[in-house]
Amino acid sequence: QQQVKQSPQSLIVQKGGISIINCAYENTAFDYFPWYQQFPGKGPALLIAIRPDVSEKKEGRFTISFNKSAKQFSLHIMDSQPGDSATYFCATGPFSGGYNKLIFGAGTRLAVHP
Amino acid sequence: GAVVSQHPSRVICKSGTSVKIECRSLDFQATTMFWYRQFPKKSLMLMATSNEGSKATYEQGVEKDKFLINHASLTLSTLTVTSAHPEDSSFYICSARDRNEQFFGPGTRLTVL
């Protein structure tokens, strides 16, 4: 099965700092790259997503950077806050198509210290 | 974003009993829903793809007779864990597609005694 390699496994950031999580994918046919945020005991919530026609997408403090040639994409959390402490999953898959499945990374546990 | 609900949020049952988990898309119709299983501190493991009006597609290694899926309408999919055993204890999460994006339910914590 095609994999998505996510790093780091865990991350500690001070309040106000920048959190950076990276993912590398294999299948160049995939054209949808979402990030999900999950709090303990809750389901994942769609945070932000990007298509390969752009190299960067920003929504508030969250930015996705996409490098098609390197087959990598990353999530940047600016001005990180303790409330951002959660597990983040990258994913990829085909954007359209009735049964398209997402392939998830292993997750990154982010802790933002006050 | 689109809203997906799950019921129940928690269930405790005795070994050998069957448990049904419901997944509903509240403000959109979903021809395709997905069922995942998540172990503590692990990623999401896709179990099956639920298609309205047809049989579910199971991932390799997932017992279809153990995990029965019914997608009876465009807003409801159910997962039934049959003859549950302690090793089936886990966090089960469903998701539904709305306009090419996938939205997750809040999850169901199953504990089998």
Image (tube, rainbow, N blue to C red):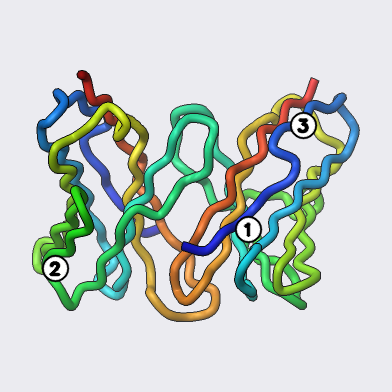
Q: Which amino acid does label 3 sit on?
A: Val
**Viewer-side residue, B6 vs B66:** B6
Query: Do marks 1 and 3 share a chain?
Result: yes
CA distance for labels 3 and 2: 44 Å
The mark lying in front, picked from 1 and 3, is: 3
For this view, does A107 lie left or right of residue B92? left
**Viewer-side residue, B78 vs B15:** B78
Q: What element carries label 2?
A: loop
Query: Do marks 2 and 1 share a chain?
Result: no
Above or below, A55 against B84 in this view is: below
Q: Looking at the rendered structure, which numbered label has been put on residue B11?
A: 3
Q: Looking at the rendered structure, which numbered label has been put on residue B56?
A: none
- Which chain does the numbered disc 1 sit on? B
Q: What residue type is labelled 1?
A: Ala
The residue drawn where x is 33% and y is 41% is A88
Q: Looking at the rendered structure, which numbered label has been put on residue B48?
A: 1
